[in-house]
Image (cartoon, rainbow, N blue to C red):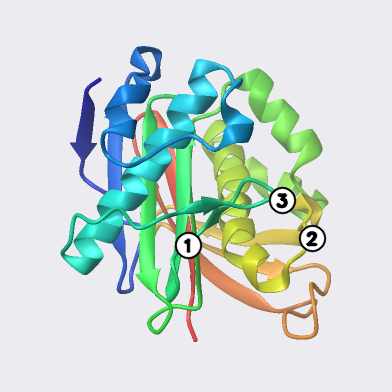
Amino acid sequence: MILVPISTPPILENTTYHYCIEFEWQEYDNLFFSTRGISLPADMEEEVPKRKAHFLGGRYCAHQALEMMHGSDEALPIQKGEEGAPIWPEGIIGSITHNENFVGAVVADKKNLRGIGIDTEKILGPQSANMIEGLVATDKEKKDSFSFDPFEYFTLIYSAKESIFKCLHPLVNKYIEFHDVNIDQVDFEKRTFDFSLLKSLNEEFKEGMSFQGRFSLERDKLHTAFELLH
């Protein structure tokens, strides 16, 4: 099984370790990962090959990022939580994303960042863009879409909210709905998006609070990230 390391998209500003690969999930080989100390949890043994390949590829990238961080090839355990999210080693935060033949992971020291979320999506086609508009976008986001390429814009709306959720979920310990967040402003030149909370998530993250994330646009993919500082 061939995993090809690729340059990381310029979406992260702070002290993080980011590792990305391209691979053909159709060539999924469990032995490749098991010999590197990476294995499937018992509840995933019966999953389809694509889901297995993405899970293991994500853990592989996470281990590579941790190796970059610690300067050691020791495979630190990354457990799988009840909802499928990774449980990071003590003192570490991180995020994993996968999309078809792309997988990436980022890790950071909790001393440097409070939270982090990354996401990568293939640019949506007409049918998928219409679905995202109907299910994910707020009324304001739908109105703002007329100023942009609709396929890039709705890909960004979806991906940005995925990154936001991945960052905030471990801090609020509750499911965040797509309509709990509004992407207020998108700057395709600076590659930034501003967003605000449309409802209070807990006593700290209140309705009306606003933040900024970053994104990177490739020919057929869009990457987003949200880093929460202390």
The front one of 221 and 81 is 81
Q: Residue at x 43, y 78 (%)?
A: 110
Q: Position of residue 177 (x, y in %)?
A: 79, 53
Report the number of discs: 3
Callout 3–callout 1 Cβ contact below 8 Å: no
* Left or right of 194 in this view: 217: left
Against 18, is 5 above or below? above
Q: CA distance from mark 3 to mark 2?
A: 13 Å
Against 167, is 121 above or below? above
Callout 2–callout 1 Cβ contact below 8 Å: no
Q: Which residue is mark 3?
A: 141
Residue 147 in view (yes/no) = no
Of badges 3 and 1, nearer the viewer stands: 1
Mark 1 burial class by Cα count in 10 Å: few <14, some 14-19, many 20+: some
Q: Which residue is mark 1?
A: 88
Q: Residue at x 80, y 35 (%)?
A: 134
Q: Quadrant of residue 7?
A: top left
Q: Position of residue 36 (x, y in %)?
A: 27, 39
Mark 3 burial class by Cα count in 10 Å: few <14, some 14-19, many 20+: some
Q: Which residue is mark 2?
A: 180
The front one of 172 and 79 is 79
Mark 1 element type: loop
Give the amino acid at mark 1: Trp
Mark 2 element type: helix
